[in-house]
Amino acid sequence: MRNILVANRGEIAWRIMRSARAQGYRTTAIYSSADAAAPHVAYADQAVCVGPAAVGASYLNIARILEAARAAGADAVHPGYGLLSENADFAQACHDAGLTFIGPRAETIRSMGNKRQARIAVQAHGVPCVPGYDAEDQSAEVLSREAARIGFPIMVKAAAGGGGRGMRRVSAPAELAEALNRARSEAEKAFGDGRLILERAIDGARHVEVQVFADAHGQVIYLGERDCSVQRRFQKVIEEAPSPAVDAELRRRMGELAVLVAKSANYLGAGTVELLLTPSGEFYFLEMNTRLQVEHPVTECVTELDLVAWQLLVAEGKPLPLAQAAVHMQGHAIEVRLYAEQPERDFTPATGRVQHLVLPSELRIDHTLVPGLVVSPYYDALLGKLIAHGADREQARKRLLTGLSALRVLGVPTNQAFLQRVLAHPSFVAGRATTDFLKHEPQLAQGQPTSSASWAAAAVLYCNRPALAAPYAAELAGFSNCPGLVATLVLESEGERRTLDVERHGGEFTLTHGEQRTMITLIGCSSTDCELSIDALRMRVDYAFDADRLHVHGPDGARSFVDLTYAPADRGLAAGSGKAVAPMDGSVVEVRVQPGDRVESGQTLVVVEAMKLELRVAADVNGKVAEVHISRGAQVKARQLLVEIEASA
């Protein structure tokens, strides 16, 4: 191998290219028209456009990717993780084109990359699986009957799926039909395969996975386990190695089972055997991911190994560099996934442009974030991963919290504050978090009111904006040719609107909101941050203006403000208005109502697909549908009006 085409994007592509370069390989990136300016494209030795923004026409277009490999002179393909990484047809097409596919053989992916086929295959070798249904018949009648046999609650899962897509928990028979429809729809869009399996839902369990590696010489080993129990929407949020629930003996048993699974599949390369660990200590096979995992950095930290370098080594036909007895784990590592999303709005994905960025230097960060980066609705909401390694779990946790507190991403909503709350929760601190942890702690996802300090900082920045826009902003920070004047501002943040009176004397401000008075001193400002004293408490605030919108990172994290001082009063899109709007940029996949229909509050009106997820848009009043402004297949923008309802008592 000399030139490796990385058939992926974003931080995934960057991570693979970084190791490939270190091993002396040339790298070729692919990109869609939406990613032409993406960092992974600039990082590669060369890059080829494979199509328009839509993922199906670019990153999932096998023919275009093979054409790109030929045009670039690539002799190997690394699929990364996600996208085509578990697509057996892609692996076979690479082989047929004379390209080295850096991953398992196509027949292995075909058997193990499908949850249904994997369950059938491993049970033939005595591997225990969660009780469920994995037969061929996909009729609604059979699935309903099998669900009743298994017993509720059950899990509905896409047979070809991964990453939590096409997955639903069903607590009662009345919920089953809707769950089957939504899971099948998501699975068909994400994986091109709408087949489903059913499994018993086991409450209080842990999601533990074992990293395995196999070479072409018959050696298969395991590299410890990872605990991935903290999940939302069945997608992992926090991962750690080793698991706080696994001792040496359990680790050996899990590892040996994972090796058995890999050997039974004639495995080659890096893979992950995912297990469900019950409160009683039993464990069941869930699935095998026939690729590198998003969370592989925690294993790299505790083993001091480069797993991508190992993948390249195995693809070259060389033996694994270590035997099982030589594998040792040092310390503890924890990873958090930074998503562009809004936890307080049921983790709805978010889009936008990164206006300001500060990354903590004390952590490992796998990402491709840069100022100016546009987070589009076309791809996954994952922005990057932050990883801390320590001598023990508590040291790693504290280091990660400290690093997160130094992170600044302004312009795009993220789950940063949510991650900080989870890491500080007593159950996580004690190592007791299970797969239903977040379900039982909904307050962790709830947004907190914007603090008075952030309101004060925003008011000062708006008042001082003309000086900040000029050269020598710091020197002009306290300048005013009309001291003592009172300015009235109307600002809105997180759905709250405030009228603020600001009186200024040089660099001193008095902010009045109702009966509340706040004293502020502007100490100094640059184009990206300012230092303030608010009621005698000195603090630094990062900020970025985007037209009339101001993004601030203050003592309560990232906040966004809009100046409505001169805006006309408009409550047309307020809650309870009867006006249903798009939650974000995306495409309409289903319209369930038409003018004249009677609807109830909470009823689904429209389903919008964005960032590989289907998002429900529901009625916020009882009434009659007056207007439907969109149709199936339409592209919509965030806050675009979709349906209008005439409210009734």
Image (spheres, grey):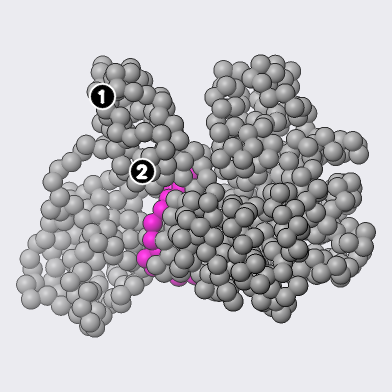
Amino acid type assigned to the residue bearing label 2 in the image: Val
Residue 11 visible in the snapshot? no
In the rendered structure, the answer to whether residue 342 lies left or right of residue 546 reads right
Amino acid type assigned to the residue bearing label 1 in the image: Ala
The answer to whether residue 558 is magenta is: no
Q: Secondary structure at mark 2?
A: strand
- Give the image quarter of residue 186: top right
Q: Categorize mark 1 by other alpha carbons within 10 Å: few (<14), some (14-19), many (20+).
A: some
Whether 69 is drawn above or below 181: the answer is below
- Give the image quarter of residue 541: bottom left
In the rendered structure, the answer to whether residue 44 lies left or right of residue 466 reads right
Whole-Å distance between the Cαs marked 2 and 1? 19 Å
Residue 67 visible in the snapshot? yes
Which stretch appears magenta? Answer: 341-359
In the rendered structure, the answer to whether residue 632 lies left or right of residue 236 reads left
Residue at the spot of label 1: 626
Q: Between 16 and 356, which is closer to the camera in this rendering?
A: 16
Residue at the spot of label 2: 636
